[in-house]
Image: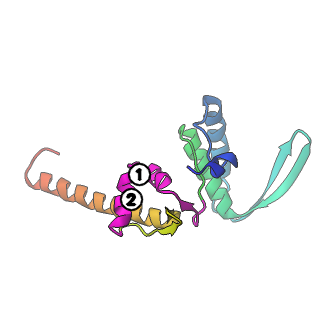
Amino acid sequence: MNSALIETGAITPTPTAEETKLASEAGRQLARLLGRGSQRLRVVADDGEETIAVPASVIRLLTTIFTEMAKGNAVALIPVHAELTTQEAASILNVSRPFVISLIEKNEIPHRKVGTHRRILFSDLMQYKKRIDADRRKALDELAAQAQELNMGY
């Protein structure tokens, strides 16, 4: 991922056992607020406390983050309009950088050039991922239907 994202703390390392426990409890507490609209949360720190207004969308996002951390997953926040390098895109898709370049050259993923470097909008990458995931699900459903028709015991 982009080193600027790492430096700003947008990417967390894999959570420790203690962090997964804290995230699980925090997620349960926040989940009770879902569906109630915007909330005011009290933040208590060593030097005092403060109440902050939090939009409902942030409550949902925090609940999702806590849920993933409770499962032991690292979490990355990427702005929807972020531009990714081909290596970052490859990491997200779990494929090689040359494979991403071949997708770009086949016009399967839109991109723009910055000098000699290709940049991919995160939103375009997610549209591609959504499309291939749907294609995979469709193929698996067809295979399952064929297995049923042939009484293969699946």
Secondary structure under the numbered disc 2 in the rendered image: helix
Q: Residue at left 32%, top 67%?
A: 106
Answer with left or right where residue 143 lies relative to residue 133: left
Say which amino acid is labelled 2: Ile
Q: Tell me the magenta residue range.
A: 79-107
Q: Residue at left 68%, top 56%?
A: 33
In the rendered image, which residue does mark 2 sit on?
101
Q: Position of residue 28 (x, y in %)?
A: 63, 45
Foreground residue among 33 and 98: 98
- The quarter of the picture where residue 61 lies is bottom right
Q: Is 83 in the magenta?
A: yes
Q: Residue furthest front?
A: 116
In the rendered image, which residue does mark 1 sit on?
97
Q: Is residue 25 visible?
A: yes
Q: Are marks 1 and 2 in contact (CB under 8 Å)?
A: yes
Does residue 93 lie above or below 107 as drawn?
above
Say which amino acid is labelled 1: Arg
